[in-house]
Image (cartoon, helix red, strand yellow):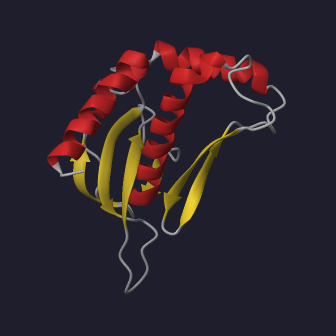
Amino acid sequence: MKIPTNLKHKPVIVSEDYSSVDGRQAYESDAKGLSLGLAQWNERGRVDISAKVWRHTGERWSRQSEELPLHRALDLAILICRAKLYFDEAYRLEKLYDPDNPVIDRIGLQGDAMTVAVCTENEMIDEDIQLFRQALADDGELIGERLHTLARILREMGY
């Protein structure tokens, strides 16, 4: 399925077969494509690029398609990696987190830091963190494959 080019987001680099590799939803996903392109929120004299997940209902392109600035897509990758690293050792904690110190890390970005923490405001956190850990473990192969690929590409880029 071809990603539309007549909408506000203007695709430049695309993966139009994303639904065949979309994790557990592979071959059954409504996420039909990914693109990097000119952001839909661009204004005269300002050009931003964004990443977009293109979703299709089977009949039309969905309003649930998501567009993110590239730095946010990378911030999500950082958050995923930090969470995975955290859960590799969280089994040592009785509740998988320390209720008195829910902060996992502060990651320096642009002169400040992104705080990564367990969401203790979630009134179901004790149950939800168990479910999250199990889902992370269940998807270990899917996530691991992507992390290995990301690490290889980052090495090729010199990082």
Going by the picture, which residue comes out furthest to the right? 123
Image height of 44 relative to 21, above or below = below
The quadrant of the picture occupied by the N terminus is: top left
Residue 59 against residue 21 in the figure, above or below: below
- Residue 136 lies left or right of residue 147; in this view the side is right
**Residue drawn at x 33%, y 20% as measured from the top left:** 27
State the residue at coordinates (81%, 39%): 121
Nearer to me, 22 or 95? 95
Report the front residue among 79 and 58.
Answer: 79
Please tell me which residue lies in front, 103 or 140.
Answer: 103
Residue 28 seen in the figure: no
Q: Residue furthest left?
A: 156
How many badges with numbers are in the image?
0
Q: Position of residue 39 (x, y in %)?
A: 39, 65
Asked if residue 13 lies left or right of residue 56, the reply is left
Q: Position of residue 42 (x, y in %)?
A: 42, 74
Q: In the figure, 40 relative to 120: above or below?
A: below
Q: Is residue 99 left or right of residue 34?
A: right
As drawn, 147 above or below 76? above
Q: Which residue is found at the position 46% from the left and 34% from the top?
A: 57
Can you tell which quarter of the image residue 71 is in?
bottom left
In percent of width and height, residue 44 lies at 40, 85
Q: Is residue 150 visible?
A: yes
Farthest bottom residue in view: 45
Q: At 53% from the left edge and 34% from the top edge, which residue is drawn?
A: 83
Residue 41 in percent (x, y) is at 46, 69
